[in-house]
Structures are given as C-alpha cells and as structure tokens.
Amino acid sequence: MPKSSVDLTIVGSIGIDTIETPTEKQEEILGGSASYACAAASFFTHTGMVGVVGTDFPVAFRQTWEDMSIDLKGLQVIEGKTFRWSGVYEDNMDNRRTLSTDLNVFETFSPELPEVYRDAPYLFLGNIHPALQLHVLEQIRDPKFILIDTMDLWINIDKENLIKVIGKCHMLTLNESEAQLFTGELTLNKAAQQLLKLGPEYVLIKKGGNGSMLFTQDDIFLLHAYPLDHFKDPTGAGDTFAGGLMGALAASGKTDKESIRQAMLQGSVMASFGVEEFSLERLKQLDHKTIHERVATLKEMGRI
Amino acid sequence: MPKSSVDLTIVGSIGIDTIETPTEKQEEILGGSASYACAAASFFTHTGMVGVVGTDFPVAFRQTWEDMSIDLKGLQVIEGKTFRWSGVYEDNMDNRRTLSTDLNVFETFSPELPEVYRDAPYLFLGNIHPALQLHVLEQIRDPKFILIDTMDLWINIDKENLIKVIGKCHMLTLNESEAQLFTGELTLNKAAQQLLKLGPEYVLIKKGGNGSMLFTQDDIFLLHAYPLDHFKDPTGAGDTFAGGLMGALAASGKTDKESIRQAMLQGSVMASFGVEEFSLERLKQLDHKTIHERVATLKEMGRI
C-alpha cells in the first residue's frame, strides 16, 4: 500500500452542536459521529475521516483534528453551512430531546472515499443514511473488518436498506433501546440472536453507563463501563466507543474474538473520558499513559 | 456454639403475593424478602429465618422452606392473616406498580431471635422498618458481618432510624434509584461515597439486569448480571442476590474483600435463576452443579 494510505476509514456526520444539560449549556461546539470516532481512533492508529462540512466551518475545529493527526483527505468542504444540531438532556441526563436539526450541506452529502482509503483494512460506518453506507461499501476493496452503527431513525424509515448494509458488515453496533426497537424482543439476548441472523458475525449492544455486550452465535462477552464520579455530556459516547474500538483493533492488525475483547475495553475507556467534558475537550488533553492507567483500573474493578 | 445454632440469620418480610406481568398473572404465591433470601442462602449455609405469618399460611409454603433445610425456629405464627402484596409489572418489566398492600399480621410484627440465633456470625437484615432492624441488632451478640437492605419507603419516612441502623452494619445494599434518592447524587460513585460516610465498610448498589457495584473507601468492584434469554418475574431478585451473597460468605467463614467478591458472584447467579420463574419455583429445582456451571459461564463472559 502507498505510504499515504490509512489503516482505518471512518465515515459519519460532522456537526456543530448546541447542547444543554441540567447544569450547563454550550453553544456551537464540535460534534458529529465522525468527529468523535476519529478523535478516539487517532490514539491508536492512522485514521482517515470521510464527512462533509460547510464553508462556515471554523478553522479551529479543523485544527483540532489535525493536531490529532487525523487524515482529512476524505473531508469534503461544500459551499454553505455545516450541519447543526441542538439538544437538551433532561431527567438527570437519562433522556435526550432534540431541539433542532439543520442538515445544511449534510443534506446532499455523498461519501466519496479518496483512492488511498479504498484499501484500508478497517472501516467504521458511522451513523448516516443506510443508502449512503451502502454507497461506501461499493467503493472499498478487500476489507478486513467493517463495523456499522445506526440509529432509531433509520430503523423506522429505511429498515430495508439497513438490513442490506448489516448483511455486508462484520459487526453491528446499536443501543439497547434500538436493539429492542429493531427486533421487538424484550431481552437483549433474544434481540441479538435475531440481529445475528442478518449476517454479521458480531452484534455489539451499548448500554451507556451500564456497559456493553458483544454477541456471537456461540457466546457473549460482557464489558463494564468505567464508573465516573462526574460527567458533563454523554453526546458522542457511542461514537467515541466505536472509534476507540476500531482504532485499537486496527492497531492490533487482527480480527479475532480475543483481540475484539481487548479493543472493546480500549473503546469503552475512551468513551468514559469523552463524556467527562463537552465535545472533544477531554480527548484533546488525553495521553496514552492516562488511558493505560484507566484500562488497568477497569480490569481490576471487574476481576473475579 | 450449640449444634442447633445457625450460621446465618435472615430477618425480613414473608408475604403471599399476586403478581401480574405483561404476559402472565400468578395469584397467592409465596413471596417476601425473608423467603427469597433464605431460599438462596440455603444452598450455601445453615440459615435461620425470622419473620411472621398468619394462621392462614399454607402448609405447602412452609414445606417448601423445610425441603430447603431452612431453620424455622425464628418463624412466628400469629392468629390472623398473612401479609398480602399485589403488584403489576409494566413497560417491558421496567416499572413496578403496587396494586394493594395488606399488612395483616406483619403490622404488629416484632422480630424476636431465638436464643440459638443470637450468636450466628452472619446476619442479613432484610427490608423491614428501620426501628425493627434496630430491635434485631439489640438482640445479637458479637456478629461477624451484618448486611442491611432497605427501600425508598423508609428513606422517605424514617431516614433518622435508617441512618442509625446503617451505622451499625458492615454492608448496606440498595437499588440504584434508592441510592440516588437517599443522597440526591446523580452518579453512583458520589452516592456511594456519601453512604460510606454513614459508617458501613461496604455499599452494594444493585442495578438489576445491569449488574451491581460494590464500593469501599478505596475501590470499586463491578459485577455483571448473568444475561438471560427470558425471565418471568423480577420480584425478590434483590433479596435472592443478598441471600445468596450472605449464604456464600457465611459458608466461606470469611469477611475479607476477595471473599465478598466471590460471594457476590454466587448471589448474582442465584438471582438470575430466581427471576426465571415466579416465586421460588426455579430455586426449588436448582442443584449445585447447575449453579457452578452458571458461575463459570458468567466469569468467562466477563473475562478480559
């Protein structure tokens, strides 16, 4: 492969968010699934971002990614405004309500992979329209491991295409409530068994502060979330988890079950850092020593 | 100690329950915190039950306990009707609503420990009025380890006495929502740190299907719940957990942190069996081999 290639390609949304929690409000901060996931992955491997921003996109935000050595050859800059989202967390952070969504340049986004991304062995298809996820899959060659994320919106309005994408991926990740919505099953065990029938080898169900579960046809892996004294903003936690997971997996060069367990552990720890501050503020200040320490602590907390 | 002594005394409620879930209704079944906890503990150690029933109490229910070799010297039989409770589980089992509570003989219950229970090294104070829990504490001699459970009702109406009891126990257990209610803290870390200040060495926070967390001043132990394909009735899960934990701890004869981790694992697995059927139906049919197998599976599921 040419030297300019990446090990991991991440496709997703890039947004400018305004977020209100019970104690704080932050306006016009950097967000989006691709942004969170690339930031987390960048600690582990050479990562390329595929997404779109408008010409209003602050240069400081771009600089944040560059400081993390994220490859931006896949970033499209389109005349117009960047995607905006605003939301509020209620009921002790348990419930998120969207206040406004302005798609702007994201409305006509078509993800195009730079030639040097097409041989990347690892791909994370962040939460975007399933038709766009399919379009990405048509551009890649000989992938080693593909993770796909989705959301309730696509389950509700385009389940058909979503099922097609899932069938072409190695791992599907979704939230607890999305797994239940998708399958109509009450227990996550049964929901996961149904989702595995769609084709992926792994189904990863995220439960926020309650950890995550990795299902295969044969077994289940349970992972704790790192218990935090305080957290400020859960936005992007799932993307940070997935990005960290895929970054660590790409760094290992492997795709076996044991490597995935270890990569999930890294991803979960990255997410625990991410929610300590708004946007990428905590991730920006993170170093490998701090990550390793928390990984070790989390392992010890779960030792039996 | 005399041969007739028990290793573990369990004090709590005994009820006849009528329970409705989204798929099923069962009437007049055996329930109560002492019943669930003793049943679980009986698999590990010689357990004595302290509670009250009315003269209407079915002989078959008493036989269930005797078949489990639970010591019933502490069981009071009072002229009148047994405590009745009925409730319904809504919203995919997430929410429990009480339909009726008839205290009956439980209204004037005063727990009296038989002489041979007073030297029992382990004590589980199940969820009853804090004043009654204090009355039990006055009767015991030289206890090795005391676990206390409680509920939102007592936090709301008699926090003062509850705080007194907690200060005299080694471990406090409560649900996630009760820990938040008690302390007003959002994160369980902060809630637990506040509760530890009341005096207990350990605070055990139960999160149902999301596992449990054991806090000390120095560290946190995280335990997964066993993921079930199906479950029928979550009633008594917390008591089954606590009973299994205390039974296993009493069987170990120890009270150190490592022994508590292992005992929690046993308790958690007992609770996972308990919810598979209503009342004690699943526990009645359980054997040690089946318990050991699930313990081993749960350990493997969490291995990293």
Image: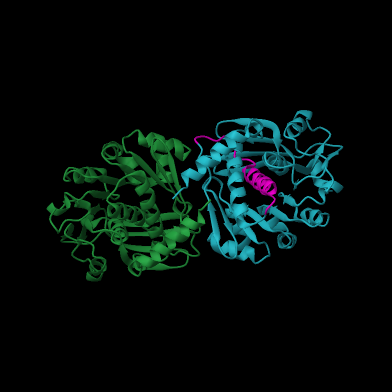
Chain colours: A green, B cyan
Prevailing SS of the magenta stretch? helix
Residue A76: image location, x then y, percent: 17, 58
| Figure label count | 0
Quadrant in which residue B291 is drawn: top right
- Left/right placement of residue B268 relative to residue A273 reads right
- Left/right placement of residue B193 relative to residue A133 reads right
Residue sitting farthest toward the top = B60
Query: Start and end of the magenta stretch?
Result: B229-254
Q: Is residue A230 visible?
A: yes
Please name whichever residue, A199 or B263, is drawn nearer the observer in this view of the structure: B263
**Which residue: 56% across, 64% down?**
B190
Quadrant in which residue B217 is drawn: bottom right
Examine the structure image and report whether residue B243 is included in the region drawn in magenta: yes
Identify whether B221 is placed above or below B37: below
Residue B245: image location, x then y, percent: 64, 47
Residue A282: image location, x then y, percent: 37, 67
Identify whether A92 is placed above or below B296: below
Please name whichever residue, B24 or B174, is drawn nearer the observer in this view of the structure: B174
Quadrant in which residue A130 is drawn: top left
Residue A279: image location, x then y, percent: 35, 64
Q: Is residue B184 visible?
A: no
- Left/right placement of residue B57 relative to residue A34 reads right
- Left/right placement of residue B3 relative to residue A290 reads right
Examine the structure image and report whether residue A36 is included in the region drawn in magenta: no
**Which residue: 55% across, 35% down?**
B231
